[in-house]
Image (cartoon, helix red, strand yellow):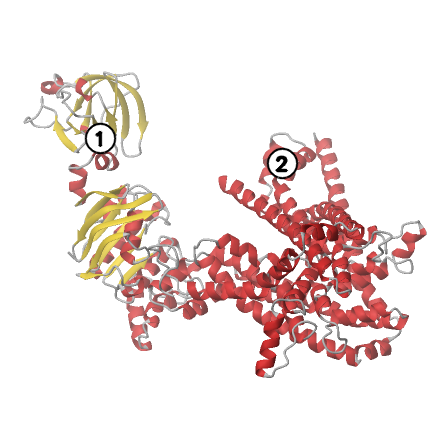
Amino acid sequence: MKKPLKVKHKVRVIPGFGLTMGITVAMLSMLIIIPLASVLLYSLRLSPAEFFGLITAPNVISAFVTSIVCALIAAFINSIFGLILAWVLVRYDFFGKRILDGLIELPFALPTAVAGITLSKMYSNTGFPGGFLSGIGLDVSYSHIGIVVALVFIGIPFTVRSVQPVLESLDGQYEEAAYILGASRRKTFFKVILPEMFPSLLTGFSLALARGIGEYGSVIYISGNSAKNGTQVVSYVIMQKLERMDYSSATAIALVMLIISFVLMFAINIIQIRRSRRVNAM
Amino acid sequence: MYVELKNINKYFGDFKAADNVSFGIEKGKLVALLGPSGSGKTTILRMLAGLEKPDSGEIYIDGKLVNNIPASERGIGFVFQSYALFRYMTVFDNIAFGLEVKKTPKKQIKERVNELIELVGLSGMEKRYPNQLSGGQRQRVAFARALAPEPTLLLLDEPFAAIDAKVRAELRTWLADMIHKVGITSIFVTHDQDEAVDVADNIIVTNQGRIEQHGAPQEIYNNPETPFVAEFIGTSAKYENYGVLKGFSREEKINGALIRPEFVEVFKSDNTSIEPYLKYADDGIVENVTFRGNSIELTIDVKGLKLTALRSLERRKIDVGERVKVLVYRLYAFDNEGVKIIENSDIAGKETVKL
Amino acid sequence: MDYYDKKQNRSQKVTKYLLIAVSVIFIGVMLVLPLISVIVNSLKEGIEFYFKSLSTEFVTSALGVTVMATLISVGVNTLFGIIASWLLTRFEFRGKNTLSTLIDIPFSVSPVIAGLAFIMTFGRLGWASPVVDWINSTFGTDIQIVFALPGVVLATIFVTFPFISREIIPVLNTVGHDEEEAAALMGAKGLKIFRKITFPHIKWALLYGVILCTARALGEFGAVHALSKTRGQTFTLPLEIDALYMSGSADSITASFAVSSLLVIMAIVVLVARNIVEYRAKKEK
């Protein structure tokens, strides 16, 4: 362990490099990489024609469209409310602010299945506010709107917690500077503050989107999972295929999902690297 | 030689941090490694400590080859630039840590730590945490912590960088006194020539991974051996066309000259007391006058050369645009190989004027 | 000028209260209302029915499985989190960024895919299935992974894998590694350095990570759903909630909300604990 790996003439004064490297790589491989690689391995057995046949089946395409479009809409709504909530929590003082701040993480803490059945019940035509909404002709449960509601619920902490620290670090100086230069409050917000927060908002958006596309527990009760109405999400379809022992379809769809996740993760990393570069340049 | 480096080379990728570095340090001396950032001084210190390994060459401490001895067994004390005090330990525990690691008996630890706390003047602060101390006090703790296991060599990485300019001068005298009192061989890294000149017994000037000069502060100041040292030590400006000055002639192969402000004397043109020397003086026009706290800095145009001179506040006032007499005593002429001092040939041998 | 300022002030105040109102309504409708809804629905048939639904054999078994899976995954991930964050913040090496990204994979992978991955590894079609069979026939054991408790535990570990390292890494990066280097130079060994120097810096972050990890492990649904099929044996609380809810009768739906209320209480405990930890950590700074 004292002999450094690869890098020549490198001294590591702090002990434990070999040991921690060994344990980290071993655990990561056994628990994460190898299982995921098995999905890839299995789907590689399929011929390209079979693979494309499976992932372009009408109900699969429809599920991808549903998952992606609903997640996009939810992430967009979350960006707007995330911005408002972060702004209110950072800039204003009012009674109950601490409780409001503490509640933001609720969707992380509440099991998704619990959120799923509750939302489904609330927005069904016998619940509140579902009963009232269906009275004015808006059916939320068992529709695409229901899926969006569930995804807004689970996605809101991502956007708030991405924007909040950046807003805190702005400390009002920019605004004061812009204000002294004669910009109106509205202009200051749109020209100075919003561009400053945009990368973090984009990160929050991407995180909420990534979570939304793969979401299962909170969505499957409220969505109704109807192939006819196109309210099946991708995770549900994978689960359905698993239950029918259709492993070829399940792995093929999962592989496409994995690729989407990795692309999103890559994008988030780039945003963050760029941001730190820009901040460091100052 | 107590510490000796022989033909040390060290690359970081394409960057040459140490280029055939060799030097020796006598026991008990306080030595400064002085150079601009990126000159390799910190790398040399880290190689001595065992935090980096040289690509080639040998390092001896107390006559023993230490290349393959791990850092913790070289018997060195190291003071980090940021002090690296253990933030969750009290002053006492910080200083005791090295002794605890060595499994020293509790009673002995207590005695030694108390002794050191007294030595560095922090009595009564044993129970404080680092964030309850001032910058200077933290440095004292770092110093005591490094000394606690009784190392034979003390290494300090930019020990004054994290301290306010105001207390820096006071603290460096304190540290030098302390080191001499303890009698430990010490090497510290700095980019500040005042610091090196003020504190060190010997200075090693580094540049681009090479040792430029090694010697006592005064020797380095008065007799720089390389153009780099001549330019780096003290304040000076470079002039190619120095031959236009009275008393100097341009020589073959000489690329130019460095003139320090203290080599230049300025007289008001109506000054009669220096009549005998006036004929050796050049005429100049004052272009700029800046107050420097304890003196006046003048920029004077002499035959196209912009010379800088310092003038005591006690002397008569000189204004911008005034015609003055300028006398240059000496300068450092440099060629491709090195530096030589050239005295003004007109006044050589005569008594120097000082007013 | 005075008039202008007053007007400006008034419009600012209007904006402020408008935004606060929007926030409170959003949080109220989106987050608080579901909590209330769970409690109201769980008590629909009275308090007696509530406690009866909590004491069925299925629920107690599910509670046992959930607690076990949570304890094991928190233990495994704490160990991993500390070791991985030491590696990623105390050393420079090639491939460090890649390693760090790989650890974060479970954040962005659908939990259903996590379940699928273990089925494709240890299930009937999985390449590791013959290995498990060989172990069983050689040592006379009867180890089952998929659709058994080990599968549930593995899935729970998977989805909570990065939780603790993600909390510790930023703290260790901010602290820097000077202190550890200084201690190592004095000859201190790894465990002593960790215990005396690193641990005090990360204790709050570690605790925070453990809380998040616990919450996620207790509530994990998708991954476990794919890997667990036997009610009363390998079902966790969320699976039991699902089974009750999907059986469709009014009574069983109320029972499913009763079981959910247990997890709601847990979620509130987690939120309170999180806020306390954050407050203490800030105070210590």
Q: Which mark is residue B260?
A: 1
**Residue C166: % across, % down:** 57, 59
Which of the chains bears the disc numbered 1? Answer: B
Q: Quadrant of residue A7?
A: bottom left
Q: Quadrant of residue A246?
A: bottom right
Dot 2: what SS?
helix
- Residue drawn where x is 62% and y is 73% of the image: C71
Q: Report whether B310 appears left or right of C36.
A: left
Question: Residue drawn at (29%, 75%), measured in percent from left and top?
Answer: B108
Tell me: A154 left or right of C127: right
Pick the residue in front: B89 or B121. B89
Specify the amino acid type for callout 1. Arg
Q: CA distance from mark 2 to mark 1?
A: 50 Å
- What is the three-letter code of the residue carrying label 2? Val
- Foreground tag (2 vs 1): 2
Return the residue at label 2.
A192
Q: How crowded is the residue under tag 2: few (<14 C-alpha within 10 Å), some, or many (20+)?
A: some
Screen quadrant of the C terminus of chain B = top left
**Chain assignment, label 2:** A
Q: Is residue B236 above or below residue B117?
A: above
